[in-house]
Image (spheres, rainbow, N blue to C red):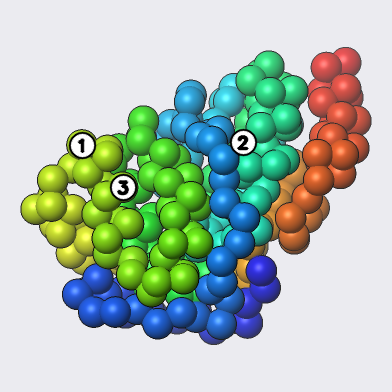
Amino acid sequence: MRLPRRFAAIAFLGFLAAACSQGADAKPGKTAASVNKSVGGKFVGEEFVIGNPNAKVTVVEYLSNTCSHCAAFDATTFPAIKAKYVDTGKVKWIIREFLTGPEQVSAAGFILARCAGPDKYFKVVESIFHSQDEMFKTGDFKTPFLKIAQSMGMNEAQFNACLQDDAAYKALNERITKAVQVDKIDGTPTFFINGKKSFEAEVSVAQFDAALAPLVAAAGK
């Protein structure tokens, strides 16, 4: 899902109070079938890290919760890669946030995920993956978001307070600006392996395996 470079300051607040129109890249797609990444993840600074923090091979995944390709990767490719490389301590997997259309929805999704806490962060992201078809077909984003928040133990007052946190949106916008300016990100999913931009699209298990296997073997010597 490619986007033009058009990020500056984005007005996020208050979008749930009104109907959100679909962005150019907002369209129904395959959704994740199960929660894959939530177990064992934690925040290190601003980044969500999964796996052995001392692993010699690092994958950085830029993703958006409104990206259908990210949802498909999460459902079809990541489980096998996680089982083979991350769960065995060979690879550290880092999640970095990015926004795709509708950007206001994507932004609110990441804010909600962080409000839920480290142990529930990726459960929220994947729940949004699961809800993509419903949201994009109906144009109703508030109802699925509120249901997700409630499933994570938040009440409606906490949900509303979460999505009215100016500091959280400012911090998110700073992360997105850094992604664009430093790593030259313009779409998702985008993957860096050991600091090198390696894939800028949905990737198969075989492609990822071919990229990781030599690095893991060399790291083990």
Say if residue 82 shows up in the picture: yes
Disc sitting over residue 148 in the figure: 3
Distance of label 1 from label 2 (alpha carbons): 27 Å
Q: Check contact, mark 1 vs mark 2: CB within 8 A.
A: no
Which circle's residue, 1 or 2, is located before the other in the chain?
A: 2
Q: Residues within 10 Å of mark 3 (few under 14, many from 20)?
A: many
Q: Is residue 93 above or below residue 27?
A: above
Looking at the image, tell me whether mark 3 or mark 2 is earlier in sequence order.
2
At a point 22% along the width and 44% down the height, the residue shown is 150
Location of mark 2 (residue): 93
Query: Label 1 amino acid?
Result: Gly
Q: Position of residue 174 (x, y in %)?
A: 41, 65
Identify the residue at the far left of this view. Answer: 157
List x then y, in percent, for residue 106.
43, 64
Label 2: few (<14), some or many (≥20) within 10 Å?
A: many
Residue 214 horizontal side relative to residue 44, left or right: right
Q: Which amino acid type corresponds to the residue marked 2 in the rendered image?
A: Trp
Which element type, helix, strand or loop, lies under badge 2?
Answer: strand
Residue 75 image point, x, y percent:
63, 42
Eye-nearest disc, 1 or 2:
1
Q: Residue, x 36% and y 30% (percent of image)?
A: 119
Please state, as top left, top right, bottom left or bottom right, where the N terminus lies in the image: bottom right
- The residue closer to the viewer here, 196 or 97, is 97
Looking at the rendering, in which quadrant would you find the C terminus?
top right
The residue singled out by tag 1 in the image is: 153
